[in-house]
Image (spheres, helix red, strand yellow):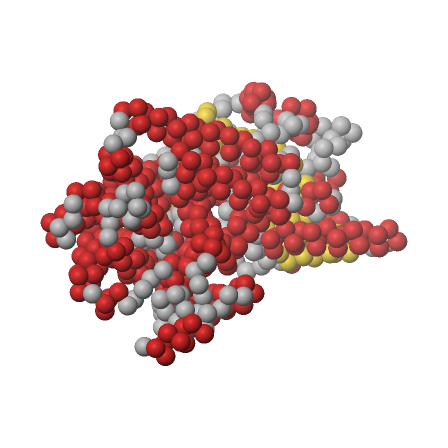
C-alpha cells in the first residue's frame, strides 16, 4: 500500500506540455487498442481516464484544464446533436419525441424515488434529487451515431428531442425541491423564473438566426465563421445558466437555431465536427473517467448497496421507457436498442444535480449517494455505448439496401469554372446535389485556348481549380480537377462529359445579358445545351447557400413526361435536405400530383408546399416575393422536347430584369437515355405504378394533340 502511494506521488505530471501530449496519445491510442476487441472508443477513453486519474495511477491531476475542456466537450455534444438534426424530421417526429421524453423522465423518476425512499430509506427531498439524477441523461454515446451516419434517423431524432425534454424536467424538479427547502419558491419566484426563460428563448430564437445569417453572408473567412458559431453556442449556454437553466440546454438551443445556416456538406460543418470529435469530446470523456473511483466498490458494503440500487433502477427505468416507446411507435428491436443506448448514459446532468445536493447550503446527499452517482456514470456510459453501437450497426445493416446505397442517380457531377469569384458558389451547389455513393463524384473543369493567350489563361485556371479543390476538401469531399487545353471551349466541356460519364454539368449564369439575343444565355451555354442531352444547371448565387431559407421551384406543364423528371426532382430535394430549407413548388395541376407523390414516397420529412400555376407567365408574380434569402429554380426545357414552350425564350431576359437581386437557377432536365420497357410513375398517394412504354407512347401522343 505504501509502495503504491509512493508510485502514485512520483508519477504525478504537472507540466502542461507533457499533459497535453499524453492526452493526445490517449485519444489516438485508446480507440486503436480497443478496436480489435470491438469495444466502442468512448468506453476506451473513459477507462483511460480512470487509469490516469487521481483514483488510478495518479498520472494527472484533474485540474482546471480538464474542467474547462470537459465543459466545452459536453456543450459540443449537445450542440452537434441539435446541429445534425433534420428540422423537417423534428417537426414530423416532434410529438413522438415529446412522448418519449415524458416516458424516459417519468419512469426512471418514479423508480428512483421509490428506490431511494423505500429501499435506501432516504428522506423525501433526497429521494427527489436522486430521482432527478436517474431521470436525466446525457448524449454521451451520440458520437457513435455520427460515425454510422444515421444522425437523421427517426429513432435518433426522437431520442435527441427526448433528451432535451428529460433534462429540462429534471432540472425543473431540482429547482422546485431546492426552492421549497430554502422557502423561497413562492408564486413570485416562479413567475420571474418563467418570465426569464421566455425572454431568453425569444432572444435566442429571434436574434441568433438573423445575426448568424448576416455574419455568414458578410464574412467568408473559415476561422472567423467557426469562432463566431462557437461564440453563439457559449453565449446561449451562459444566458441559460443566468436565467436558472443548465448550460446544456443553452448549447442545444443554439444548435437548433443555427441548424439551417450550416449545410450538412459545408466546410464549416466539417470543421465543427472535426474539432469537436478530435479534441473537445475526447477531453470530456477522459475527464469523466478521472472522477471515477473504482475502489468504492470494495471499500464499504453500504456504498456497494447504494451503487447497485441506483444503477439497477436507472438502467431498468430507461430500458422500460425505450421498450414502451418502441411498442407504441411500431418500431423494431434495433430502434428500441438505439433509443435505450442514447438515453441511458448519465454524465453532465447527474454531476450537476449531485453537486447541488452536496452543497453545504443544501446538504441533502451524503458521500454514499455521491459515490453511487459517480459509479452510475461509469456503468451507464459503458452500457449506453455498447447498446448504441449494437443498435446503430444493426439498424444500418437492416435499413440500407443495395440500390439505396448506390444512390438515386448515377453519373459524376461536372462543374465548369471561368471566373474566380464564382468558385465557392458553384462548388457548394455541386456538393449539395452530387451522388455521394460513387467514387470521384465531383469533377472541376476549366478549359483554356490553345494559343498564346492560353498560357495566361492556363495559370488563372490552375489557381481557380486549386481554390475549388480546397473548398471541396474543407468539406471532406474529394474533387478531381481537370485543366483542359482546347481550340474550342464547348467541345472541351462536351468531351469531358463523355469521357468521364458525367450525369450533369453546372455552369455560371452571366449577369451581362443586355447585349445578348432574347433567348440566349451566352454562346457557350447555348452550344452546351445543343451538344448534350444530359442535365444542365445554370446558376447565379447572390448569397452563400447556407443562408437560404426558401427555395421556390417553377415547373412547366408536362414536365412529368421528360426522361429526367425524377432526376432533377431528386437534385432539388437534396438541396432542401442539405440546407434544411423550405421547398415551394409552383406547377400545373396535372404535374403537381407527380411531384407530391415522389415527395411523399422519398422525402416525406422535407418541409414543402405545393401551389398550382396554370400558366408559365405566372412566374412574373413570383418576382414580387424575391428576397436575398430565397432562391428561384426555373425548370425549363430544350427546344423540341415535350415540355418545351415558346415562352422559355424570354426567360433569360425575365431573370435579368425581375430577379436580379436574388439567387437563380435554370435547370434543363435530361433528354437522353436508352428506351426502357417500363416507367415508374409516382401517384399522389405515394404508390408506384409501372406502365409499359408502348402505352406511354400512346399517352404522349394524346397529350401532345
Would you identify the image quadrant in which residue 87 lies?
top left
Quarter of the image with the N terminus is bottom left
Whole-percent x, y for residue 374 in the image: 30, 57
Whole-percent x, y for residue 437 in the image: 49, 56
Whole-percent x, y for residue 482 in the image: 70, 57
Is 452 or 269 nearer to us in this picture? 269
In the image, residue 657 sits, relative to residue 673, either above or below, namely above
Is any atom of residue 673 visible in this view?
no
Q: Is residue 384 left or right of residue 567?
A: left
Q: What residue is drawn where x is 26% and y is 27%? A: 186
Would you identify the image quadrant in which residue 529 lies?
top right
User: How many marks on residues?
Assistant: 0
In the image, residue 336 sits, relative to residue 616, either above or below, namely below
Q: Is residue 663 left or right of residue 355?
A: right
Q: Residue furthest bottom?
A: 3
Is any atom of residue 151 visible in this view?
yes
Q: What residue is drawn where x is 78% and y is 56%? A: 485
Is 215 or 552 nearer to us in this picture? 215
Q: What residue is drawn where x is 23% and y is 57%? A: 368
Whole-percent x, y for residue 30 in the image: 43, 69
Q: Residue furthest left?
A: 118
Q: Residue furthest right?
A: 452
Q: What residue is drawn where x is 67% and y is 51%? A: 468
Would you identify the image quadrant in which residue 49 lies?
bottom left
Q: Is residue 3 left or right of residue 629?
A: left
Amino acid at each position: 500500500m505504501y509502495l503504491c502511494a509512493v508510485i502514485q506521488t512520483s508519477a504525478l505530471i504537472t507540466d502542461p506540455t507533457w499533459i497535453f501530449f499524453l492526452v493526445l496519445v490517449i485519444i489516438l491510442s485508446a480507440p486503436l487498442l480497443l478496436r480489435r476487441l470491438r469495444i466502442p472508443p468512448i468506453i476506451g477513453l473513459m477507462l483511460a481516464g480512470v487509469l490516469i486519474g487521481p483514483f488510478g495511477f495518479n498520472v494527472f491531476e484533474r485540474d482546471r484544464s480538464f474542467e474547462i475542456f470537459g465543459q466545452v466537450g459536453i456543450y459540443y455534444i449537445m450542440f452537434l446533436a441539435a446541429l445534425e438534426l433534420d428540422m423537417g424530421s423534428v417537426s414530423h417526429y416532434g410529438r413522438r419525441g415529446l412522448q418519449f421524453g415524458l416516458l424516459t423522465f417519468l419512469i426512471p423518476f418514479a423508480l428512483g424515488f421509490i428506490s431511494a425512499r423505500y429501499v435506501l430509506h432516504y428522506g423525501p427531498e433526497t429521494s427527489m434529487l436522486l430521482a432527478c439524477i436517474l431521470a436525466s441523461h446525457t448524449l454521451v454515446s451520440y458520437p457513435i451515431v455520427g460515425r454510422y451516419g444515421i444522425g437523421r434517423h427517426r429513432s435518433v431524432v426522437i431520442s435527441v428531442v427526448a433528451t432535451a425534454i428529460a433534462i429540462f424536467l429534471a432540472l425543473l424538479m431540482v429547482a422546485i425541491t431546492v426552492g421549497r427547502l430554502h422557502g423561497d419558491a413562492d408564486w413570485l419566484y416562479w413567475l420571474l423564473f418563467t418570465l426569464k426563460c421566455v425572454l431568453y428563448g425569444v432572444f435566442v430564437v429571434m436574434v441568433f438566426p438573423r445575426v448568424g445569417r448576416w455574419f455568414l453572408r458578410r464574412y467568408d473567412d473559415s476561422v472567423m465563421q467557426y469562432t463566431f458559431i462557437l461564440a453563439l453556442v457559449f453565449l446561449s449556454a451562459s444566458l441559460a445558466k443566468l436565467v436558472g437553466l443548465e448550460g446544456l440546454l443553452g448549447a442545444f438551443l443554439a444548435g437548433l437555431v443555427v441548424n439551417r445556416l450550416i449545410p450538412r456538406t459545408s466546410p464549416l460543418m466539417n470543421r465543427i465536427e472535426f474539432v469537436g470529435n478530435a479534441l473537445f469530446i475526447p477531453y470530456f470523456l477522459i475527464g469523466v473517467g478521472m472522477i471515477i473511483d473504482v475502489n468504492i466498490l470494495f471499500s464499504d458494503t453500504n456504498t456497494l448497496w447504494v451503487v447497485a440500487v441506483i444503477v439497477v433502477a436507472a438502467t431498468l427505468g430507461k430500458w422500460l421507457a425505450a421498450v414502451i416507446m418502441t411498442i407504441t411507435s411500431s418500431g423494431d428491436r434495433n430502434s428500441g436498442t438505439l433509443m435505450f443506448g442514447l438515453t441511458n448514459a448519465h454524465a453532465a446532468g447527474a454531476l450537476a444535480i449531485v453537486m447541488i445536493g452536496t452543497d453545504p447550503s443544501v446538504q441533502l446527499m451524503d458521500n454514499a449517494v455521491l459515490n453511487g452517482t459517480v459509479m452510475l456514470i461509469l456503468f451507464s456510459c459503458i452500457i449506453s455505448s455498447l447498446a448504441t453501437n449494437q443498435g446503430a450497426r444493426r439498424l444500418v445493416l437492416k435499413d440500407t439496401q443495395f440500390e439505396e446505397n448506390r444512390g438515386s442517380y448515377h453519373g459524376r457531377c461536372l462543374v465548369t469554372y471561368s471566373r474566380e469569384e464564382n468558385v465557392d458558389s458553384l462548388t457548394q451547389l455541386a456538393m449539395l446535389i452530387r451522388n455521394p455513393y460513387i467514387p470521384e463524384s465531383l469533377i472541376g473543369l476549366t478549359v483554356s485556348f490553345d494559343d498564346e493567350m492560353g498560357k495566361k489563361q492556363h495559370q488563372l485556371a490552375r489557381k481557380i481549380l486549386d481554390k475549388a479543390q480546397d473548398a471541396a476538401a474543407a468539406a471532406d469531399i474529394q474533387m478531381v480537377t481537370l485543366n483542359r487545353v482546347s481550340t474550342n471551349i464547348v467541345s472541351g466541356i462536351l468531351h469531358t462529359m463523355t469521357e468521364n460519364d458525367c450525369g450533369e454539368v453546372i455552369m455560371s449564369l452571366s449577369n451581362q445579358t443586355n447585349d445578348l439575343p432574347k433567348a440566349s444565355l451566352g454562346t457557350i451555354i447555348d452550344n452546351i445545351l445543343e451538344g448534350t442531352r444530359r442535365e444542365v444547371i445554370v446558376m447565379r448565387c447572390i448569397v452563400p447557400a447556407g443562408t437560404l431559407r426558401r427555395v421556390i421551384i417553377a415547373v412547366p406543364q408536362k414536365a412529368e413526361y421528360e426522361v429526367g423528371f425524377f432526376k432533377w426532382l431528386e437534385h432539388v430535394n437534396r438541396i432542401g435536405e442539405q440546407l434544411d430549407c423550405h421547398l415551394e413548388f409552383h406547377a400545373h395541376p396535372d404535374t403537381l400530383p407527380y411531384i407530391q407523390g415522389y415527395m411523399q414516397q422519398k422525402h416525406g420529412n422535407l418541409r414543402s408546399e405545393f401551389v398550382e400555376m396554370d400558366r408559365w407567365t405566372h412566374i412574373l408574380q413570383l418576382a414580387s416575393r424575391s428576397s436575398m434569402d430565397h432562391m428561384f429554380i426555373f425548370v425549363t426545357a430544350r427546344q423540341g422536347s415535350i415540355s418545351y414552350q415558346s415562352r422559355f425564350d424570354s426567360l433569360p431576359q425575365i431573370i435579368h430584369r425581375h430577379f436580379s437581386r436574388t439567387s437563380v437557377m435554370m435547370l434543363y432536365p435530361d433528354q437522353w437515355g436508352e428506351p426502357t420497357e417500363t416507367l415508374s410513375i409516382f401517384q399522389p398517394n405515394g404508390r408506384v405504378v409501372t406502365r409499359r412504354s408502348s402505352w406511354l407512347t400512346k399517352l404522349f401522343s394524346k397529350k401532345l394533340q
